[in-house]
Image: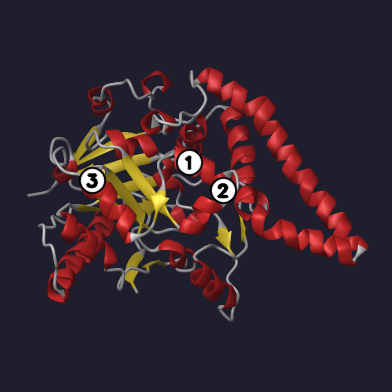
Amino acid sequence: MPTNYYKLNLASLPDDLYNKETDVKEWLALTTTSKGSFPPDSLNRVLRMDSSVELERIIGISLWMVGNVLPFVLPLFILASILSSTGLVLLKAFLTYVAVLASLNKFIFAPMFMKRYKRKQLSNTDIKDNQYLHTERNNQKYNSLQFVWPESVNRPALNDKPVIFTAIPHGAVPLGITCYPVWSKLFNDKLCHWTCAPVVLKLPIVSSFMKHMGYIPAKAKHIVDTLTKKEENVGVVLDGIAGMFRSDKNTEIANIKQRKGIIKIALRAGVPIVPTYGFGHTSLWKIVVDPFGILEALSLKLDISLTPFFGRWGWFLGPPQRVPLCVALGEPVLCPKIDEPTQDDIDKYHSQLLQSYADLFECHKASYGWANKKLVFV
């Protein structure tokens, strides 16, 4: 019998329902359902949006991108400025670029959208409320974000336990996961903490934002403590930085064949894993991969991206293409609690996870317009 699937279009969700106080039933009332796959090409439609939202994301995402690389490239620009006049020109141009983006964001777009969405400053204690930040709301509109999930994860199926959401592919930036309230509201009421490389939580400015959104280091101890002591959800981009370098026109390549650590964590905590696929993640930016694999090797070693990528209009570290995103959830892997799982235990549930990913990709790829694409695990 075909599985029932649910779809929620986050991009068209009324703004007055996008807040912590809204009962999840009001979101669920806006879902559409399908027995089996949704119709072909129904999950890849770009919706019209307000021009001010588009401009805010063009500026905001570009500022976010440069903020991530600033601590690494600024010393290089300073050194270059000392060594040559050309370096000085480049330093001034870079600082001017950053200053223009930051000023537009601070004095125009942030006040505009905080007022429009009735938002206040980020709280040091209320992470759930922080997750409704205007920038992430505008991501949903910019990329026409939709969520799709099966009956097996629809409420109340996951109400009683915390959940691990494992998302792939990473792409340059996995924008689909930034709809933070969905993970903390739609499937159960538990706050969801996404993970990131520990170094990111040490970057100036960027780290403060990430912590306000509930991010934790992608380390086993932090994940286990969140699941068992706080009894809250965790989200993991399973292929990590390696997922930036793996894709082509006809194939989506998931670097998760050896990513078994999350299975061990789930078994020790006795929590389900929900596989999640971001259709469109690999199309947002054009990533330049050097033929010798040097940048990939360095990125994997340092656990942070060192490879250049280009967005809309060929803009270096600029806004992404206006590609529609569909975040699809698969059948959960129900992990029993095993204090000391054996390798056989880990392999068994890891195989189930890979199969669930394969099934969800096959189920939804034609609906997204990728009927001829294949998913390959490496």
Q: On the image, numbered disc 3 is attached to which residue?
A: 229
How far is the residue under mark 1 from the one under mark 2?
9 Å
Residues under numbered marks 1 and 2 in contact, where contact means CB atoms less than 8 Å apart = yes
Q: Residue at x 53, y 62 (%)?
A: 304
Residue 369 spot, x, y in % from top left:
38, 52
Q: Is residue 276 left or right of residue 46?
A: left
Q: Residue at x 20, y 40 (%)?
A: 34
Mark 2 Cα within 10 Å, few/some/many (few <14, many 20+)? many
Q: Residue at x 42, y 62 (%)?
A: 240
Q: Nearer the viewer, residue 235 or 290?
A: 235
The disc placed on residue 320 is: 2
Q: Nearer the viewer, residue 42 or 282?
A: 282
Q: Residue at x 24, y 28 (%)?
A: 28
Dot 1 or dot 3: first in sequence order is 1
Q: Quadrant of the C terminus?
A: bottom left
Give the secondary structure at mark 3. Answer: loop
Residue 285 spot, x, y in % from top left:
55, 55
